[in-house]
Image (tube, rainbow, N blue to C red):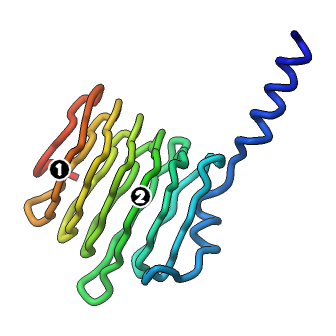
Amino acid sequence: MKNYIIFTLTISLTILRSESLYEVYQEAGPGNGYDKYMVLEPSVIYTGGFGTSVYSVLLEGNGAVIDLQGGTGIWVSGDESDSPQLVIKRCTIINGGYYGVNFSGYGNHEIIDCNFINDVWGIQVGEQSSTTIRNCNLIDNTYGLAIIGLDAVVNLAYCNGWGNTETYMSNCLG
């Protein structure tokens, strides 16, 4: 029995490995019409976040887990002349010390089929950002979705929230 447990543990540790999400971002090339096309593997736990103010990014999560390990998360901030875009699909973002995903400045973004668990602010949208959030779960965050100011546009559809201090907060202070 002891050998079986050791064998199972060894196989589990071999199957699940971790990799820096920032390194995946740095190494990503263009694809599918985006400046950065990131494809994650479901058997890898990705650690840390990344940010951009110039690139359009498609993050294909494929069911992968992104553990922010208490860090700030994934952020996008653009200006009128160079508004970046971020599309995140099918991943779970956990343990954000401040936010899971933050959109500020200008830009059009999408979050589809994702989970935000145990982030202080799961998703934060502010300023002139326009964001579509569809089929997402916001679980055990301080704020599931926080909309900062009056000019941010959020289209929210088919999302669930539970265990949050506040699931949805609109026009809150940043």
Q: Is residue 52 above or below residue 33?
A: above
Q: Residue at x 23, y 53 (%)?
A: 174
Side (left or right) of 167 relative to 75: left
Quadrant where the N terminus sits is: top right
Image coordinates for residue 30, horizontal then vertical, percent: 53, 83
Q: Nearer the viewer, residue 66 or 135?
A: 135
Judge whether 61 appears above or below 39 on screen. above
Query: Can you name the residue that lies furthest to the left here?
Result: 150
Quarter of the image where one finds residue 2 = top right
Callout 2–callout 1 Cβ contact below 8 Å: no
Residue in the picture at 41% in, 37% down: 117
Residue at figure coordinates x 12%, y 58% from the top left: 149
Q: Where is residue 5? Give x, y as percent.
A: 83, 18
x then y, percent, for residue 121 = 32, 44
Identify which residue, 117 or 156, lies in the foreground.
156
Q: CA distance from mark 2 to mark 1?
A: 28 Å
Give the residue number, with chain letter if any, for mark 1: 173
Dot 1: element: loop
